Amino acid sequence: MIVNGQVVDDSAVRREADRLRPEYERVFADEDPQQREARLLEWSRENVIERILLAQKADEDDRPIPPDQFASALSQLKEQYSGQAHSFDELAADEKESLKAEIIQQLKIERILRELCRDLPEPSEQDLKRYYQENKQRYETPEQVRVAHIVKHIDWQADENSALEAIHKAKAELDAGAVFENVVARYSDCPDNGGDLGYIRKGQMVEEFEDVIFNLGVGETSDVFRTRFGFHIAKVYDRKPAAVCSFEQVREQIREQLKDDMSHKAIDDYIDALRAQAVIEQT
């Protein structure tokens, strides 16, 4: 492939495909493997072309990069090499110069894109409210319960019978009127904070734990129940119903989202314009 006279080796597309493949195959796992691979290669090719077009624009920009920006980026690169077999300082002179040139090129690309988005207008109040009305479901907080528990783990240190015997002793003390937090301190394998786990949202804990706690009333204590981690007794202290955040609560979050959307569109439009003007040949 040749992009504006620059020869691009096929290996660049293959490396990009290898980078994208794990996430790509997870998202599109149900597709026909041959079709999936063909589209992956096409997307990888487009990514490579876009990066080359941006690099070519950066190379046309003869404005120098401020020394402090270059020094900061070089310092970050050296830190990346610190965990590898060879440090940056051990690289050959030509390898160092090549990496430094890549840093300058990347900083110029970032400057071009930053300048492209610098003068974008602020979202209006009408824009913010419209987005909120159209996307209220994004700002829904699910039902929550504040829960504490007594737990006896089953692992290499504790067999099932001993864990079950201990949790039933704890339950007997609770049934006899003992204070939950005191029983936590005497029996639980996780006694910190009186066993208090704070507010739990649905989907946050394992299903077998949530099946119990979301069916308890405030102040109610469960029977002994089992999860994959061991035996538990849970107590619910408070409940918060599902609710939608008010516009005022999420105004700034929406503002940042719309600004990000405008920036991404401006960059996409810029790259599309570069692509429309480019001469791309298949070899």
Image: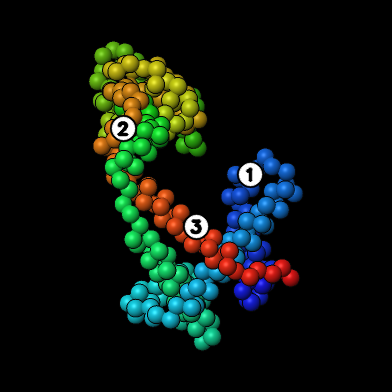
Q: Which residue is mark 2?
A: 245
Residue where numbered disc 1 is placed: 28
Specify the quadrant that holds the C terminus. bottom right
Q: Position of residue 97 (x, y in %)?
A: 49, 83
Q: Is residue 179 left or right of residue 187?
A: left
Label 2 element class:
loop
Up the image or down, 244 lies above or below 35; here it is: above
Q: Residue at x 39, y 81 (%)?
A: 64
Q: Secondary structure at mark 1?
A: loop
Q: Nearer the viewer, residue 5 or 52?
A: 5
At x 28%, y 23%, the residue is: 238
Q: Which of the pair 51/79 is nearer the observer?
A: 51
Furthest toward the top, the residue is 176
Residue at the image point whose x is 71% and y is 53% from the top: 38
Mark 2 or mark 3, earlier in chain: 2
Label 3: how many residues lie within 10 Å, few (<14), some (14-19) or many (20+)? few
Q: In the rendering, at what x and y percent does residue 4 appear?
A: 61, 74
Mark drawn on residue 268? 3
Give x and y (percent) for residue 275. 57, 64
Q: How is the image coloured?
A: rainbow
Tell me, for residue 106, which label it has, or none: none
Looking at the rendered image, the disc whose residue lies closer to the viewer, 2 or 1, is: 2
Please name the amino acid that badge 1 sits on. Answer: Phe
Instruction: Verify CB contact (< 8 Å) between mark 1 and mark 3.
Output: no
